[in-house]
């Protein structure tokens, strides 16, 4: 059976500018292998934004086989991962630590019941001004998407792995399971777009971007409401992710927006694994001990 969404090799290949894709044959997951700056060693991280695999019971053997190939592995687990917590903890020899709670929508429950009044009101008003359309051939809309996403990067001063290149987006838009929607105003202008990956019973919110007019018209409410309605029947759940930052401040706007669609959450975990103990100890020598993993990448604890 062909895999879709974050499980798809095509998705992981789209992130190759951030690391070399490494397929884990037993579990059916993938990692990105990256160079450790200033060394001749490498480590691995899970793909952005989540590490998904088909068989979590096979993951311990996959990680054991990485001994001396990479120094360490760090992943953020899928909130819908089907694993026994204690068994999964044994796969990661530096622990499986609770990270962020992701907001989820149960599509068996009408949005009129699950969404807060504020969200229902904003969605209703936005849908009076905007038409939401599912894009039947997403690659044709790539230019519009890249323009909107460039505005998003500038607006929020984004850096790092979420600043995808055009080539990365070209590949992401060809990943099986993509569902893309656009909001169009009365003049025919696309003012916002949202991307989802459908994977089994779950639709994962991937990315969204809006023009200045899209923000003014609250296009995000129209897009999320209409996408949820149209994905009902294709998937059971929508996974909206969490707020921004490592601590996920409950008062920030993104968290409030996601929380307003449903009271339900599912946890994610940081899986931390050291594949080469000797090299890990060498790289950490002289550094202040912190909770950051891998410790040798903690800029704040760098050797003086």
Image (spheres, rainbow, N blue to C red):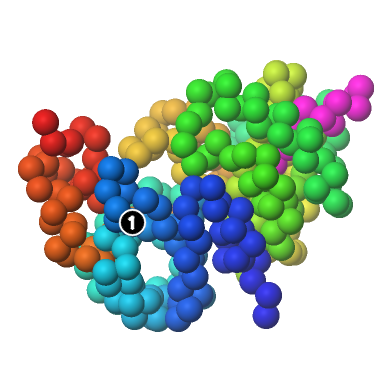
- SS for dot 1: strand
Between 204 and 137, the one lying in front of the other is 137
Between 52 and 127, the one lying in front of the other is 52
Is 110 rendered above or below residue 245? below
Residue 168 drawn in magenta = no
User: What residue is at 17 percent from the left and 36 percent from the top?
Assistant: 302
Whether residue 209 sits left or right of residue 87 in the image: it is: right
User: What residue is at 53 percent from the left and 39 percent from the top?
Assistant: 162
Residue 160 placed where, x, y %?
A: 46, 37
Q: Residues within 10 Å of mark 1 (few under 14, many from 20)?
A: some
**Residue furthest left as drawn:** 286
Which region shows up in magenta? Answer: 184-194
Circle 1 sits on which residue? 42
Which quadrant holds residue 271? bottom left
Number of marks in picture: 1
Residue 141 placed where, x, y %?
A: 82, 41
Between 116 and 90, the one lying in front of the other is 90
Residue 163 placed where, x, y %?
A: 55, 36
Is 275 rendered above or below residue 207? below
Quarter of the figure that contains the N terminus: bottom right
Residue 192 drawn in magenta = yes
Quarter of the figure that contains the C terminus: top left
User: What residue is at 17 percent from the left and 50 percent from the top?
Assistant: 283
User: What residue is at 46 percent from the left and 73 percent from the top?
Assistant: 24
**Residue furthest right as drawn:** 187
Whether residue 282 sits left or right of residue 170 in the image: it is: left
């Amino acid at each position: 059976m062909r895999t879709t969404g974050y499980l798809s090799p095509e998705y992981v290949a789209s992130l190759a500018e951030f690391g070399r894709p490494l397929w884990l044959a037993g579990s059916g997951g993938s990692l990105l292998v990256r160079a450790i700056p200033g060394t001749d060693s490498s480590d691995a991280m899970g793909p952005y934004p989540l590490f998904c695999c088909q068989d979590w019971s096979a993951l311990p053997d996959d990680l054991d086989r990485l001994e001396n190939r990479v120094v360490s592995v760090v992943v953020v687990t899928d909130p819908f991962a089907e694993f026994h917590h204690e068994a999964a903890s044994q796969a990661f020899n530096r622990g499986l630590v609770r990270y962020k709670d992701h907001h989820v929508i149960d599509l068996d429950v009408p949005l009129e019941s699950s969404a807060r009044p504020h969200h229902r009101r904003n969605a209703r008003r936005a849908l009076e001004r905007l038409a939401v359309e599912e894009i039947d051939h997403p690659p044709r809309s790539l230019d519009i998407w890249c323009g909107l996403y460039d505005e998003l990067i500038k607006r929020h001063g984004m850096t790092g792995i979420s600043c995808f290149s055009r080539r990365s987006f070209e590949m992401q838009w060809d990943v099986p399971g993509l569902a893309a929607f656009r909001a169009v105003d009365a003049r025919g202008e696309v003012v916002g777009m949202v991307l989802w990956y459908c994977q089994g019973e779950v639709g994962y919110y991937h990315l969204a971007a809006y023009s200045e007019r899209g923000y003014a018209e609250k296009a995000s409410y129209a897009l999320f409401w209409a996408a949820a309605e149209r994905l009902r029947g294709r998937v059971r759940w929508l996974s909206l992710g969490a707020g921004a930052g490592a601590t996920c401040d409950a008062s920030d706007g993104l968290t409030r927006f996601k929380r307003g669609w449903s009271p339900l959450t599912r946890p994610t975990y940081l899986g931390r694994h050291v594949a080469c103990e000797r090299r890990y100890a060498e790289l950490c020598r002289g550094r202040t001990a912190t909770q950051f993993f891998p410790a040798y990448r903690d800029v704040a604890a760098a050797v003086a």
